[in-house]
Image (spheres, helix red, strand yellow):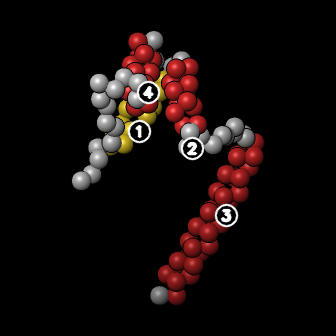
Amino acid sequence: MKITICTHKVKLKKAIFACILLVSFTHIVWAAYPAKVRDISGREYFQAVKEAIDNAGQSISAALYAVSLREDQPNSQVYQLCQSLVDAKNRDVDIRVCEFPAQG
């Protein structure tokens, strides 16, 4: 019984040490490879996403939630983004889309 408790404590200490080591290593990796990040929320979203799609050269992976595409509204932002995906496919860009339908 005492051996099991001791082993359990050793495993717990090893697990805690591994987590600390992992967090420390992750911090080093992030510091070594800084990322350029910009806020594209609000009004900047559409133009930033459209530019990213239009400038894609190899592949695009997108997750879409409840897309409502209406052909009678070709000037809508949703339609323009979908058209940009079609244009990218025609440029031989690999397109992967995962759509999540609306709940309700």
* Residue type indicated by callout 1: Ala
Read off the residue under disc 2: 41
Q: Which tag, 4 or 1, sits closer to the chain's start? A: 1
Q: Do tag 2 and tag 3 residues touch (Cβ < 8 Å)?
A: no
Q: Which tag, 4 or 2, sits closer to the chain's start? A: 2
In this view of the protein, can residue 82 be seen by the observer? no
Q: Which tag, 1 or 2, sits closer to the chain's start? A: 2
- Find residue 82 and report its image quarter: top left
Identify the secondary structure beneath mark 2: loop
Q: Circle 1: is it few (<14), some (14-19), or many (20+) Cα within 10 Å?
A: few
* Residue type indicated by callout 4: Leu
Q: Where residue 44 sits in the image (x, y, percent)?
A: 58, 37
Read off the residue under disc 4: 81
For the residues marked 3 and 4, what is the alpha-carbon distance in whole angstroms?
Answer: 43 Å
Considering only vertical position in the picture, is 10 above or below 58?
below
For the residues marked 1 and 3, what is the alpha-carbon distance in whole angstroms?
Answer: 33 Å
Q: What residue is rendered at 41% in x and 38% in y? A: 63
Q: Where residue 91 sits in the image (x, y, percent)?
A: 45, 12
* Residue type indicated by callout 3: Ile
Read off the residue under disc 1: 63
Read off the residue under disc 3: 20
Q: Which tag, 2 or 3, sits closer to the chain's start? A: 3
